[in-house]
Amino acid sequence: MININLWDHNDNIAKAGKPVDKSEWMLSPQTINAYNNSTNNEIVFPAAILQPPFFNPDADDAINYGAIISVIGHEMTHGFDDNGAQYDGKGNLSNWWAPEDAKNFAALGDRLKAYFNAIEVTKGFHIDGKLTVGENIADLGGLTLGYYALVKSLEGKKAPEPIDGFTWKQRFFLGWAQVWHENMTNESLINQVQTNEHSPARWRINATLAQMKEFSEAFGCATGKMAVGDADRIVIW
Ligand SMILES: [Zn+2]
């Protein structure tokens, strides 16, 4: 690992002063991940992410819109999260916001930080709202984009039938849950909330979905753990 880091460092240093190679990818084709690179104003999806549970050619549209389409929406939204929003369309660090918009955006971000700060994942450990705010904005925005892309794709068509007792609206959210759910030790969970900018899987799913009125409508949730009330709902994008 030391040698890899050393190679990577030298490779980066060698780029100094040379033209930017905009065709370069930061991930290999076989890596299951994706990213938004603000300085290139691009989103990148290696081939390997286009397989279940992210994309399943045998699943119905609702599942895939809740999965890969919302993940694509997540990466798009990173261009407009607390960090990406500081870059303009050319990938330069410059403030293109109207002052009032920037103020409102920051206030909504602060509310989202407070919402996640309040979540205790295990005794004595909370999600770090500040550390995770960019990812949480991207999850909320990505799911909203994915959901309304699905609604648009169904315009003028007959609503899809339930499958295994789940409506298409419910299957959309199951697609999201299938992407992120995982088993985790308590030690790993404690490590994650202190070091990782992503909220742990359970809350990446549940805490984000509880913010969406589309979710509480789909599953008929009363206001509570899985559905915040109207006054507590945070809509950013
Ligand atoms: Zn992200």
Image (cartoon, helix red, strand yellow):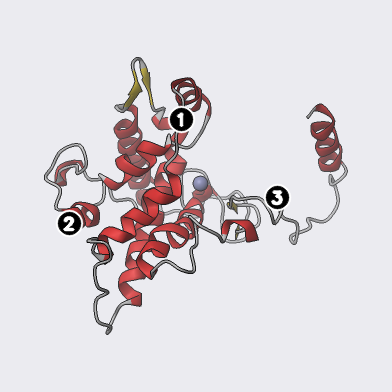
Q: CA distance from mark 1 to mark 2?
A: 30 Å
Give above or below for 208 relative to 144. Answer: above
Residue at 22 percent of width and 42 percent of height: 226
Could you tell me how far apart the alpha carbons at marks 2 and 3 are, in whole angstroms?
Answer: 39 Å
Secondary structure at badge 1 equals: loop
Labels 2 and 3: the sequence-earlier one? 3
| Callout in the foreground (2, 3) | 2
Q: Is residue 208 left or right of residue 25?
A: left
Q: Could you tell me residue 158's position as x and y percent? A: 24, 81
Report the Cα–Cα distance between label 1 and label 3.
Answer: 27 Å
Residue that badge 1 annotates: 184
State which tag comes first along the sequence, 1 or 3. Answer: 3
Q: Tell me if mark 1 has few (under 14), some (14-19) or many (20+) residues whose alpha carbon lies within 10 angstroms of its own.
A: few
Name the kind of residue labelled 1 in the image: Met
For the question of whether residue 216 can be seen, the reply is: yes
Quadrant of residue 153 within the rendered picture: bottom left
- Mark 3 — residue? 26
On screen, residue 155 versus residue 133, left or right, reads left
Q: Single out the mark in the foreground, 1 or 2.
A: 1
Q: Where is the N terminus found, in terms of image quarters?
A: top right
Q: Earlier in the sequence, mark 1 or mark 2?
A: 1
Q: Give left or right: position of 102 versus 35.
A: left
Category of crowding for the residue at label 3, using alpha-carbon neighbours closer than 10 angstroms: few (below 14), some (14–19), many (at least 20): few
Residue 93 lies, in percent from the top left, at 60, 48
Q: Pointer 2: what residue?
A: 217
What residue type is disc 3 on?
Met
Residue 237, visible in the rendered structure: no
The residue shown at (31%, 77%) is 154
Relative to 11, residue 72 above or below: below
Residue drawn at (28%, 66%), measured in percent from left and top?
Answer: 163
